[in-house]
Amino acid sequence: MAALRGRWTTLVIRELLRGGRTFSELSQALPTLSDKVLSDRLAHLTEAGVVDRRRQAGWPPRTHYRLTALGSGLGPVLQALWDWGSQHSPQAAPPGGR
């Protein structure tokens, strides 16, 4: 659970579940996320062993991110959280229900 801490972390993982991405591609996919926050989340996920970071030589330098095997295992966890949230959202609750 410590790997999932922080706002936006699950969205970064969601994007990487779709395949490896560069920082720019992640930034475009998550436009409401500032570059600083994206960088912080990627650093945290890298330290947690969930994301692999590879720097490509050249100009401009590119940094590629992809999920590790450990990170890929979060796919079913995030899907379960999504399913639970969908079933328990205020719109899904019956009138007068919980």
Image (cartoon, rainbow, N blue to C red):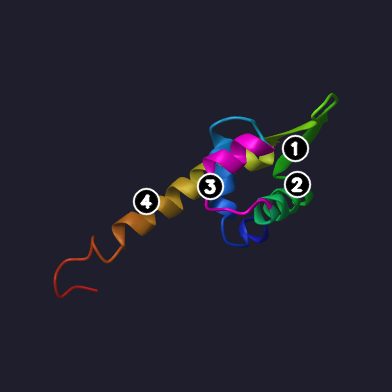
Residue 52 got which mark?
A: 1
Of labels 3 and 4, earlier in sequence is 3
Task: Tell whether 14 sits left or right of 81.
Answer: right
Label 2: few (<14), some or many (≥20) within 10 Å? some
What's the distance in space between the residues labelled 2 and 3, CA to CA? 21 Å
**SS under mark 3:** loop
Query: Which dot, 2 or 3, sits closer to the camera?
Result: 3
Query: Which dot, 3 or 4, sits closer to the camera?
Result: 3
Q: Residue furthest top?
A: 58
Of labels 2 and 1, earlier in sequence is 2
Above or below, 58 relative to 52: above
Label 1: few (<14), some or many (≥20) within 10 Å? some
**SS under mark 1:** strand
Residue 46 got which mark?
A: 2
Q: Nearer the viewer, residue 79 or 64?
A: 64
Q: Residue at x 77, y 37 (%)?
A: 53
Q: Amino acid at mark 3?
A: Pro
Q: Which residue is mark 3?
A: 31
Task: Tell whether 43 sits left or right of 37.
Answer: right
Q: Nearer the viewer, residue 43 or 59?
A: 59
Residues at discs 2 and 1 in contact (Cβ within 8 Å): yes
Q: Which residue is mark 4?
A: 83
Range of magenta residues: 23-35
Q: Quadrant of the C terminus?
A: bottom left
Q: Amino acid at mark 2?
A: Thr
